[in-house]
Image (tube, rainbow, N blue to C red):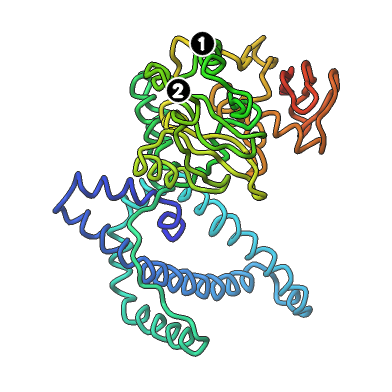
Amino acid sequence: MEMALISSSLFQIELEKENKKGSFHSKILSKSINNSKKFITTMLIGNTISLVIYGIYMGKLFLNLFPKDFFDNSLWIIFIETVFSATIILIIGEFIPKLIFSVYSNELLSLLIIPTYVIYKIFYPITNSIICISNVFLKILGEQENDQKKIFDKEDLICFLSENIEKNAKEKEFIEVEIFHKALNFYEKKARECMVPRKEIVSYNLVISSIDRIRNLFTESGLSKIVIYKNNIDNIIGYIHYLELLKKPKNIESIIRSVELVYVTTPVKEIMDLLIKKKRSIAIVLDEYGGTAGMITIEDILEEFIGDIKDEHDENLLLDNKLNDYEFLFSARLEIDFINAKYNLNLPKSDKYETLGGLIVTYTGDIPKHGDKIVINRNFNIEIKKVSKNKIEEVFLKKNF
């Protein structure tokens, strides 16, 4: 029961309690969860008493099973009794019940909560005494008891949603739950996870730009905004929206809009709040040295929830080709989370990288050459199919089953 309480989904229990609100069973369950410290202490007391009784009767059993002459060597009988008793305890008293109660924690906690609560009431005075003694020791050691009650946390909710994703066969329901799942992790997202990398920013130099050149760049790229820098891309001064060109401006400077500056470690939630507050649509992401690391827009942030937002000007630049069940052609810019979610490949994840190219560079320590073959965790064979001077473009990936 101790294992059941630790392993159970508190969020699921709360939902079940709401469905059976007012019943005797739900009240008992609520009291046990709200007093989990006393509940677990009671289980430890009961476990200790059962082990003591078990030890006494196991000794008597050995006295009856073996002849009296056998007990001349007391060390030998102690050794045999210890091995035999410990084996039974570990298998029948620890491993098997804890395994069962961890797998079916919610069901068994709900089923056995009433008899357990009766035991809890019987040992209540002893439980309170032990907790008071432990609190005294905590005060002596300078620690404070944490009385904060936790009903459920984000991990419980994620687990509940994951179970629903597996149960829901309808695609629409799957998408809705998946969006909500992404929303739970939104506060942990950093700018580097959803920004447009420096190399992919469409920009223009203010020094050599003109109205006609900017107009042609808008036509060629199909974008609605173009970043403007002075001399080099580490000195971005703003951006131009294509609507400004319809006003027939006299010069470039008059139509440049300012951008917000954030860092690669800035939470995405803060960036979204900043852009909405300042009524901006673009933020430039800076690295630790103050150079331009990338760019992030409101659209990029929204894509973290609902996936890629494409319009008629967007091109499918990222190669995503499944050859068979275990061979793929991928763009190195594809995110590890996307590949794992779509193909269930279980590629290794880390805070050091977000993309397949980042994974390869992390393992090799350098940008590999065309035709190089890399083995990752003995599970994945990767061959570089296309590479430029400073980045990996396309790779062939084979999973070893």
Q: Amino acid at mark 2?
A: Lys
Asked whether 277 or 106 is in front, the reply is 277
Check disc 1 and give the amino acid type.
Answer: Thr
Return the disc, 1 or 2, that comes first in the chain's sequence: 1
Tag 1, which secondary structure?
Answer: helix
Q: Which residue is mark 1?
A: 219
Disc 2 crowd, CA 10 A, few/some/many (<14, 14-19, 20+) = few
Q: Position of residue 202 (x, y in %)?
A: 58, 24
338 vs 275, left or right, is right
Give x and y (percent) for residue 16.
26, 45
User: Looking at the rendering, which quadrant does residue 370 occupy?
Assistant: top right
User: In the image, what residue occupies the spot 67% across and 63% down?
Assistant: 84
Q: Residue pushed farthest front? A: 250
Where disc 2 sits, the SS reads loop
Image marks 1 and 2: residues in contact by CB distance under 8 Å: no
Instruction: Give the quadrant of the C terminus.
Output: top right
Q: Is residue 147 above or below residue 284?
A: below
Q: Which residue is mark 2?
A: 250
Comparing 31 with 219, the one in front is 219
Mark 1: few/some/many CA within 10 Å (<14, 14-19, 20+): few
Residue 129's place in the image compared with 121, above or below, is below
Q: CA distance from mark 1 to mark 2?
A: 20 Å
Label ID, residue 59: none
Residue 338 x, y percent position in the rendering:
56, 27
Q: Residue at x 55, y 55 (%)?
A: 92
Q: Is residue 233 left or right of residue 267?
A: right
